[in-house]
Image: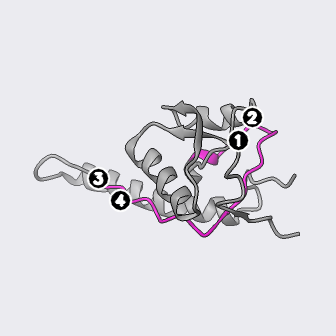
Amino acid sequence: MPEEVVEVGAPAEEAWIRGTSFACAESLRAICGVAGFTPVIALDSNRCPATPAMVAAGHGTALVPSPALAAPPPDVTVRPLRPLPPPRRLWAATQGRSGAAVTHLVDCLVATATALPRLALTDPGSPRRSP
């Protein structure tokens, strides 16, 4: 059975848990704004791993980046959104001329970041659950 996709505006009346970093807070504001509502913020979370636990405790709904969904609490249902939110862009800042070790580390980070969204969406062992 295919996963149920959640329309961004569907949980408009629910309480929301907002990430406190600029990227998280701005993403929530922008995504909800496109759906035609302003989210009612119940809690702010400054730690991505804590957000699914807040959802599990019944404090609200949250938008969570796929890398943070490696092991959500068992009573949290994770569903893809429609429309898809814009991709996150991350930059690696290095000091001056980087040596081979730094270049290798950045290459590994890029490979991992590129693979994570695919794993979260297609891996049969994915944390996504149906109600």
Residue 104 numbered tag: none
Q: Are marks 1 and 2 in contact (CB under 8 Å)?
A: yes
First-in-chain label (4 vs 1): 1
- For numbered disc 1, what is the local secondary structure? loop
Does label 2 or label 4 sit earlier along the sequence? 2
SS of the residue under disc 3: loop
Residue picked out by circle 3:
92
Q: What's the distance in space between the residues labelled 3 and 2, CA to CA?
A: 33 Å
Type of the residue with mark 1: Pro
What secondary structure is the stretch in magenta mostly built from?
Answer: loop
Quadrant of the image occupied by residue 126: bottom right
Whichever of callouts 3 and 2 sits on the residue coming sooner in the sequence is 2
Q: According to the image, label 2 marks what residue?
A: 56
Residue 14, how many percent across, how many down?
70, 44
Q: CA distance from mark 4 to mark 1?
A: 28 Å
Closest to the camera, between mark 3 and mark 4, is 3
Residue 81, how many percent across, how many down? 65, 63
- Which residue matches tag 4? 107
Q: Earlier in the sequence, mark 1 or mark 3?
A: 1
- Amino acid on which disc 4 is placed: Asp
- For the residues labelled 2 and 4, the Cα–Cα distance comes to 35 Å
Q: CA distance from mark 1 to mark 2?
A: 9 Å
Above or below for 124 versus 47: below
Task: In the rendered view, tell whether residue 79 sits above or below residue 64.
Answer: below
Q: Nearer the viewer, residue 71 or 84?
A: 84
> Which residue is identified by label 1?
72
- Residue type at mark 3: give it: Ala
